[in-house]
Image (cartoon, rainbow, N blue to C red):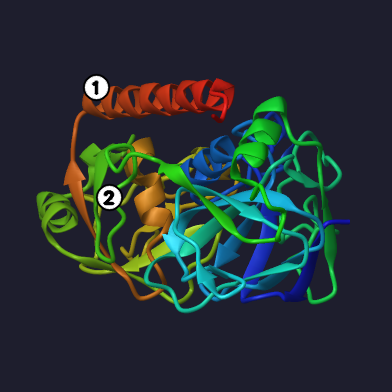
Amino acid sequence: MSLLVNKAGLLTSVQDLGRYGMQKYGVVAGGAMDAFALRIANLLVGNRESDACLEIAIIGPELVFEKPALFAIGGGDLSAKLNGQAVPLWRTVYAPAGSTLKFGRPVLGCRAYLAVAGGLDVPLAMGSRSTLLSAGIGGYEGRALRPGDRIGFGQPSALGRRLMEKLKPRDGDGRVSISQWSVSADLLPSYAAQPTLRIVEGEEFHLFDEESVNRLLHETFTVLPQSDRMGYRLAGGALKLKQKAEMISAAVTFGTMQVPPDGNPIILMADRQTTGGYPKIAQVATVDLPLLAQVNLGGKVRFRLISLEEAQAEYLKRERAIRQLGHGLKQLGKIQEV
């Protein structure tokens, strides 16, 4: 075992990119709330983008690396420190054996992702290592982490081993080492305390009255305390249909915005149900889901309508940039130290 949990934090769980192919049986996809952050953190330590990481919410844990390890943190800034030294986001870090990683107050965002070279070694459950807390499936015994838990690592990839050799201090004195390389700011989402999220029209967009559409696009909405990994409940001006309509349950996905009878929209998140029967007024563009995932309870959001073609173009642009980052890291691993 390689990672010891001294303090668990508010909600720390093992997550990957989700449990797909099982929704027809009623098993939700789950996975990371901020999938972008998990993917990039994994790339920075030579992992596959889909490898299991720790998702750390708001109040972070205290963790001890019982063996030397290579790690990276992406997503929200939760004031991480390794042996008292500040750990920047989006960089590769070498932790000598016995190092303690602590988290402090949230600076920006509310979820951080800790990737360790080799990935977290927990059993696969229906093709995924992600934790579905509501069902007690996957992750570490199907639950959030507790003090005293120990999680092993898988075998680092060839790239992970090369990156570790680059960062490991030559004198072997057990010092922390942080990479000079990092992720370009141009690739990172524009995390903000009150983001404007791009949306496309939902299937029932046309059923809402003009006042409600104007309200959606021009007013500020608040994330209510009742929000969780299943859905973000929003408070703002009530959204109303032109006339009552009977809805048939239909497929939903991450970012689907439904409007229940009280008029306060709900945006479905990682642990969403497989189908929904409320009218769907909008869909948050995939590239902006990380911004939404980093909004804390009580946070504010606004919306801007774009076309489906624009949303697809932005998605493809980001995917190309992620692939380019992966290629760049592979090339970095081939460079020999002088």
User: Which is more N-terminal, label 2 or label 1?
Assistant: 2
Q: Nearer the viewer, mark 1 or mark 2?
A: 2
Q: Which residue is mark 2?
A: 190
| Residue type beneath disc 2 | Ser
x 38%, y 21%: residue: 320
Name which quarter of the figure residue 200 lies in: top left
Q: Could you say where residue 327 lies in the image, as x and y percent from the top left? A: 48, 20
x 45%, y 48%: residue: 90
Q: Is residue 157 left or right of residue 301?
A: right
Report the front residue among 174 and 130.
174
x 40%, y 69%: residue: 296
Total numbered badges shown on the rendered structure? 2
Q: Is residue 153 left or right of residue 174?
A: right
Report the front residue among 269 and 24.
269
Secondary structure beneath label 2: loop
| Residue type beneath disc 1 | Glu
Q: Which residue is mark 1?
A: 309
